[in-house]
Image (cartoon, rainbow, N blue to C red):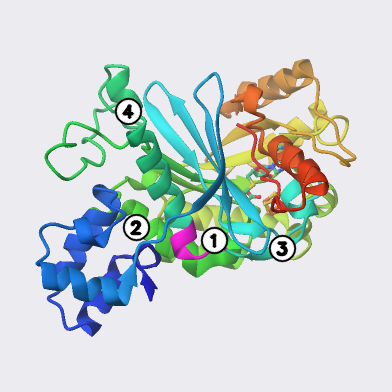
Amino acid sequence: MINLLDLDTAGLARFFAEQGEKPFRAKQVAHWLHQRLEGDIAAMSDLAKPTRARLAEAANIVGPTVLRDTTAADGTRKWLLDVGNGNAVETVYIPEDDRGTLCISSQAGCALDCAFCSTGKQGFNRNLTVAEIVGQLWHANRALLADGVNAPWIEHGRAPVSATGRPERELLPLGGTARSAKRAPITNVVMMGMGEPLANFDHVVSALSLFLDDDAYGLSRRRVTLSTSGIVPAIDRLRDACPVALAVSLHAGNDALRDRLVPINRKYPIAELLAACLRYLERAPRDFITFEYVMLDGVNDQPAHAHELVELTRDVPCKFNLIPFNPFPGTEFTTSPRARIVAFQRILMNAGKVTTIRKTRGDDIAAACGQLAGQVADRTKRRSRLPRVVAAPVSH
Ligand code: SAH
Ligand code: SF4
């Protein structure tokens, strides 16, 4: 049995060819799956009944199993998804006036063991399948629409606007007549949940291709961001295979400190990483790289560190996103005080680097992911039927 969510549009085309079906069936089914968000082959009404019956013998549609679904006062919504063997991953919806962003996981756990990351601390479990990655977007759009959530830019009476301020074409019109007035609530995707997306390269690229494909989700490349800790050869491969917007987890401006915080730096040091960033920019949909920088009290948050970053990135078109550290049980780090984060931001801004400080979202459901995962993990100890949860790194 093939899970149709496991196939990108090229895979669907191959699958239908193998079944002896006409090539246009692949497009038709992609529209049903990813635009009408259908979960039942029998409901694909423009396929003849015998075709549907044959399809249902060879394939099914299996979305994620939701273990927990929590919405915060600010509208941030988090789903905890079962990935088998007692593991779970998280996906988080973040509504804003002009966009709805979904933060997607790519692996259960992570092998890269960054010092400040709770996912890393719990080790690597396995790569997510294409269906498990795409299924996060499929499921979140379905769940939000079922609850009457429309595209945020419609609800706020705004036209979707591109990064350049120009009006953008409408995003993802949903097929069908009854729901045609609706627009999918999720307009942006960030691969910033659990796991290192470039360590699950093939599945992630297939999923990205579906996010971008006009026969599937049809998002523009600028609305899809992949965050990596800096696996240099894979950054080059991504540039060639599917150049989406790139965020790089820098976290330190010198190799000695980055070696300690982001161990993959021992293999691909900062100079090589920055060279890969410049190569990536030749094909990137945005003309800058976003550097993420977690603010760790007394570790990487001094004025000298900010000046070091300015020197380091003098020739790299980039923006900085400062992330207040999201603490988790057992960590040796604490969050930098707000005043120090603001002072750090000011140094970068004065040097001409656009620098944002990540907002913490969904506080009341601990959407700062490590915290929720921590809570579930605690319960796991008490109630063994609950799955072990790998904590997500991102705080929104
Ligand atoms: N593996 C990828 C993507 C997932 S992590 C990467 O490392 O880029 C997404 C972001 O959250 C990264 O910038 C990561 O460094 C950061 N992060 C991890 N743990 C964190 C924590 N406890 N507090 C704040 N940010 C964290
Ligand atoms: Fe993996 Fe990213 Fe966490 Fe590092 S920060 S351990 S790369 S998920």
Residue that numbered label 3 is attached to: 124
First along the sequence among labels 2 and 1: 2
Q: Residues within 10 Å of mark 2 (few under 14, many from 20)?
A: many
Q: Residue at the location (66% across, 57% down)?
A: 87
Q: Residue at the location (32% across, 45% down)?
A: 220
**Alpha carbon of mark 4 to alpha carbon of mark 3: how far?**
37 Å
Looking at the image, residue 152 lies above or below residue 328:
above
First along the sequence among labels 4 and 2: 4
Q: Secondary structure at mark 4?
A: loop
First along the sequence among labels 1 and 4: 4
Question: Which mark's residue is nearer the viewer, 1 or 3?
Answer: 3
Residue that numbered label 4 is attached to: 148
Q: Quadrant of residue 31?
A: bottom left
- Name the kind of residue labelled 4 in the image: Gly
Looking at the image, residue 174 lies above or below residue 334:
below
First along the sequence among labels 2 and 3: 3
